């Protein structure tokens, strides 16, 4: 009797874990939502009132052909790049580069890259060999409801070639 109860309990636990697991699409939606923001400014000068409202909405960039994600993505103003390529066997590679003292240096690579429902996952390998899991989402950004830019957003701590540490970044797709 105890054996049957134990087997039923283990089976129930496994089923509940699988039922609560996030799909790639749900994770992409959650990650993209972290790039939404609103700014409201109210300024009064010489009797003139100026109000400014900016709403930035980020939505996952779902594509039927994942090969169209291959491109170079740039963190504007900081000379930091991610170059995402796919070989003829369909395997993905991502190289993180940045400018340091005027030269382009490799700061890291992604291995075991997978793309599913706009979610990019892999293992980040830094230039010094340290590894950590990596998760990013391909994003379409809208400013006040108008399409603004496409890119790649991630929320985790990475060290850039200029010595800065970031915990959230948006890399704009270079067209």
Image: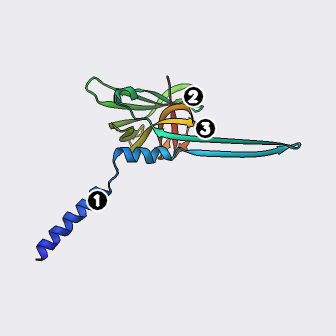
Describe the element under mark 3 as helix, strand or loop.
Answer: loop
Tell which tag, 2 or 3, sits nearer the viewer: 3
Classify residue 99 by image quadrant. Answer: top right
63 vs 56, left or right, is left
Query: Is label 2 in contact with label 3 (beta carbons under 8 Å)?
Result: no
Describe the element under mark 1 as helix, strand or loop.
Answer: helix
Q: Which residue is mark 1?
A: 17
46 vs 67, left or right, is right
28 w.r.t. 104: above or below: below
Q: Which residue is mark 2?
A: 101
Tell which tag, 3 or 1, sits nearer the viewer: 3
10 Å neighbourhood of mark 1: few (<14), some, or many (≥20)? few
Q: Position of residue 144 (x, y in %)?
A: 61, 38
Q: Which residue is mark 3?
A: 144
10 Å neighbourhood of mark 3: few (<14), some, or many (≥20)? few
Which residue is at the front of the view, 109 or 32? Answer: 32
Q: Position of residue 6 (x, y in %)?
A: 16, 71
Q: Give me the C-alpha separation between circle 2 and circle 3.
A: 38 Å
Q: Earlier in the sequence, mark 2 or mark 3?
A: 2
Residue at 28% x, 28% y: name it. 90
Residue at 43% x, 40% y: name it. 137
């Amino acid at each position: 009797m105890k054996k049957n109860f134990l087997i039923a309990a283990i089976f129930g636990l496994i089923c509940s874990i699988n039922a609560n697991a996030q799909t790639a699409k749900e994770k992409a939606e959650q990650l993209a939502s972290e790039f939404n923001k609103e700014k409201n400014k109210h300024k009064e000068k010489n009797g003139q009132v100026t109000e400014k409202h900016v709403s930035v909405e980020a939505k996952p960039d779902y594509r039927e052909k994942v090969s169209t994600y291959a491109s170079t993505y740039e963190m504007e103003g900081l000379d930091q790049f991610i170059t995402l390529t796919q070989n003829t066997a369909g395997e993905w590679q991502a190289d993180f580069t940045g400018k340091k003292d005027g030269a382009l240096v490799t700061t890291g690579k992604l291995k075991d890259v997978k793309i599913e429902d706009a979610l990019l996952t892999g293992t980040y390998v830094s230039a010094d060999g340290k590894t950590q899991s990596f998760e990013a989402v391909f994003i379409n950004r809208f400013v006040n409801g108008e399409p603004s830019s496409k890119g790649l957003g991630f929320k985790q701590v990475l060290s850039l070639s200029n010595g800065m540490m970031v915990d959230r970044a948006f890399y704009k797709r270079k067209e």
